[in-house]
Amino acid sequence: MLELSLKFYFIFFLISFFSTYLIVKYSNFFFSNSLLDKDFLKPQAFHKEAVARIGGFIILFLFSSYICFHFLMFGIFLKDYFIMSSLLFFLGFLDDLKIKINPNIRLILMFGLLIFCIKNFSIQINTSGLEFLNLWLENNIFQICFVLLCFLFVVNGANLIDGFNGLLAVHFLLINCIFLLINIVNQNENLSIILSAQVIIVLSFLFFNFPKAKIFLGDSGSYLLGALIVLNTIKTHELNPQISPFFFAGVLFYLFYEVFFSFIRKAVLKKSPLHPDKLHLHMLLYKWVSASKKKESANYLTSLLINLSYLFLQFPLFYFQNNGLISRYWFFSLIILYTIIYFRLYSFSKK
């Protein structure tokens, strides 16, 4: 069985890599330059050449292909994964096609799509690590609102950090590998296979995005990966109830807190939380790295520094994953550490 799985993964990796290569090579033919990112003046732009935002299309194409393989092999159609990732992809794809949608309208559309998926696929979070919150989660309306907020924070967090080569893709891979290890140890074979397929697909994309970007994820790709992260988290939590909910909060802390902190920061500065600026953590870190390194390498070095720091901070959390008290304290320690680092970098940027 293991030998068969390894052969399948190897073949699937080759298919994914060469499919990505062909789509990248002939992207102009397929999309007629309609997905080229030529906007070098927007706040989140850190590139100087036109780059195709086709990463989301590639990942959806490969993941949809895998879902077909999964159905043929196991007779299980991953309807929740397919529909949710497709809907979030198409919402972001409108922006990639330069079809401008008012940020408020886009947020409302995201609300509607997520509520549709949450209700139709009965996506639930039944334990939170807090007794009073567990009682509230027994209420159906509060349950839907809570799950909706989880998706909104992580999906928009994924979109916010998607500014540098490999930043979101590597972060996705780290999160998936953490969940993959947990599910392998606890013999959750079906979810382990799904997570492995996602790792292979995003690795194929990463070859063309890091360190020098030939393609971008685009909003479609960041929304898609954000949705997959939340689904993977909820399913891993369901299959491993012995693990503290605060462990999962700690794994997702960077995506969650990036949105939360940004919302509070912009509210204090009396700015719209729906409009981008250049004051996110990765942007301030980029400025700090640029001061000591060449700007050409500062882009991917910023991604490496953030993700290596994140990985290092996950080791204690992973070791104490079953200890609710330590996981809770570690989660809040991560929040405090992020805040301290942010203000240090912000002070540096003002010099």
Image (cartoon, grey):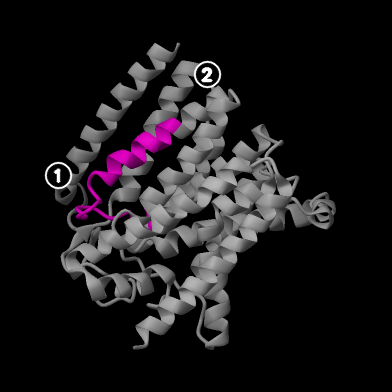
* Residue 344 shown in magenta: no
Of the pair 202 and 340, the residue shown nearer to us: 340
x and y, in percent, of residue 328 in the image: 68, 54
Would residue 107 be visible to someone looking at this image? no
* Residue 209 shown in magenta: yes
- For badge 1, the amino acid type reads Lys
Q: Is residue 55 left or right of residue 48?
A: right
Of the pair 183 and 74, the residue shown nearer to us: 183
- Snapshot quadrant of residue 253: bottom right
Label 2 or label 1, whichever comes before in sequence order? 1
> The magenta stretch spans which residues?
196-221
Q: Is residue 119 left or right of residue 231?
A: right
- For badge 2, the amino acid type reads Gly
Dot 1 corresponds to which residue?
Answer: 25
Of the pair 163 and 102, the residue shown nearer to us: 163
Q: In the structure shown, which secondary structural element does the residue marked by tag 2 occupy?
A: loop
Q: In the structure shown, which secondary structural element does the residue marked by tag 1 occupy?
A: helix
Crowding around mark 2 (Cα neighbors within 10 Å: few <14, some 14 to 19, many 20+) is few
x and y, in percent, of residue 279 in the image: 41, 77
Residue for point 17% across, 54% down: 32
x and y, in percent, of residue 102 in the image: 45, 73
Quadrant housing the N terminus: top left
Dot 2 corresponds to which residue?
Answer: 75
As measured in the structure, the alpha-carbon distance from the residue carrying label 2 to the one carrying label 1 is: 34 Å
Q: Is residue 246 left or right of residue 9?
A: right
Q: Is residue 151 left or right of residue 11?
A: right
Residue for point 57% across, 43% down: 318
